[in-house]
Amino acid sequence: MDKFESQSAVTGLGMSDIGRRLMRDPMALTIDACLDAIDDAGLARDDIDGVCTYPGMISGAPGISGAGAFDVMDALRLNVNWYNSGLEQAGQLGSVVAAMMAVATGLCRHVLCFRTVWEATYTQLQRTGQVRYGGGGGRLSGGMEWRIPYGAASAANWIALYASRYMHEFGLTREQLGQIPLNNRRNAALTPYAVYKEPLTLEDYLNARIVSTPFGLYDCDVPCDASVAFIISHVDTAKDCRRGRGVGFEAVGTANSERVSWDQGDIRYEPGLVEACKMMWSRTDLTHSDIDMVQLYDGFSFNALCWLERLGFCGEGEAGAFLEGGKRIARDGELPLNTNGGQLSAGRLHGYGFLHESCVQILGEAGERQVPGNPQTSIATSGGGVPGSALLLKAL
């Protein structure tokens, strides 16, 4: 198959400071990450001819977006042939897929992709009266009109319902589910930028306060302030970039046949994943045994469990047994999972952190947390709600 994926590569990685309540302007974080990525690729700003981001500047979700494509194009004085941003994409990493297509079709040679969050600082500003949540008045519409009256305003409530149903049907225990946050915390201890590195025991996990049954505190990801950026380049230019190589794309999964809804599908699983996984596998000759590690979206621990099953690393209802004891998903196990600590410990980098970690590991630049055996492949996923996307990456 002549695939568009084979035409592009990640040639530059950038990351701003990451932390809780950094009290920095989100645009400053964005520029730090973008300049870092451009420099990491060995490029200059004049080389950047495309910009892509998720979700752009959107109203009604303070802290979720710190900068849009126009903001960065103006701040860095970029002259581009193509740009894109928006919320309705195949997960947060759908913006990277869009950049890949722009490169493959000849619109651009080097696309700057970025994702910025500043939820922790925004919440603090709101608590201290320095900002106000805008809007108000009128009637609720859409799904929220059925949720707010019951106090179900958070995805923690909605995804907890899936987890409860899954536990009821398949016998998953909290001890088994807890292996995901325990594994993530062990990996975060070796990650310099991780928000939480303190040791976490199974007893700590089980005794933590319940957020939304069955989720306890450590089943929920960590809102933070951060920006992550990438340079997506035409594969022919990778040899001319700083490293002389990049990280390639083997296959992407962006399909979705389910209703774009939190409550109108298979209520045992997070929605919007199954078709993305099928599509990704249909676009490669690689099989499960060829995958060296997985970096799976874990806005909540159960999200990562859903990705494990939907990707086919275990059968329907078998994730509990797969996770039992945590050895299989350990950094030195058969399928290393979320080797930087994921969003549960490293911080909620909203999907971009998983692509960043995949690249760092494949390039052999992960330091103490490097997966043994020189990993050559990785799957990175995104989508904490609907829909999702899956990227299969490979060494070039």
Image: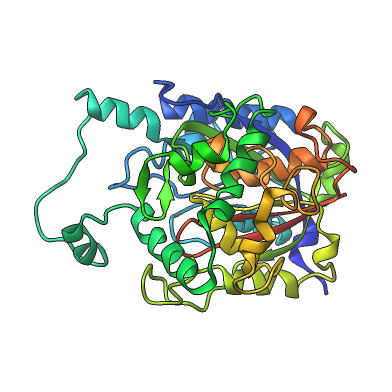
Q: How many numbered tags mark residues here?
A: 0
Viewer can see residue 93: no
* Residue sitting at x 88%, y 37%: 244
Residue 246, image x, y percentages: 82, 43
> Viewed as shown, does residue 377 lie left or right of 223?
right
Viewer can see residue 343: yes
Please name whichever residue, 229 or 42, is drawn nearer the observer in this view of the structure: 229
Color encoding of the figure = rainbow
Residue 189, image x, y percentages: 65, 28
Residue 283, image x, y percentages: 76, 72
* Residue sitting at x 11%, y 61%: 139
* Residue sitting at x 42%, y 36%: 66
> Viewed as shown, does residue 121 lie left or right of 166?
left
Residue 25, image x, y percentages: 41, 24
Please name whichever residue, 146 or 282, is drawn nearer the observer in this view of the structure: 146
Please name whichever residue, 334 or 103, is drawn nearer the observer in this view of the structure: 334
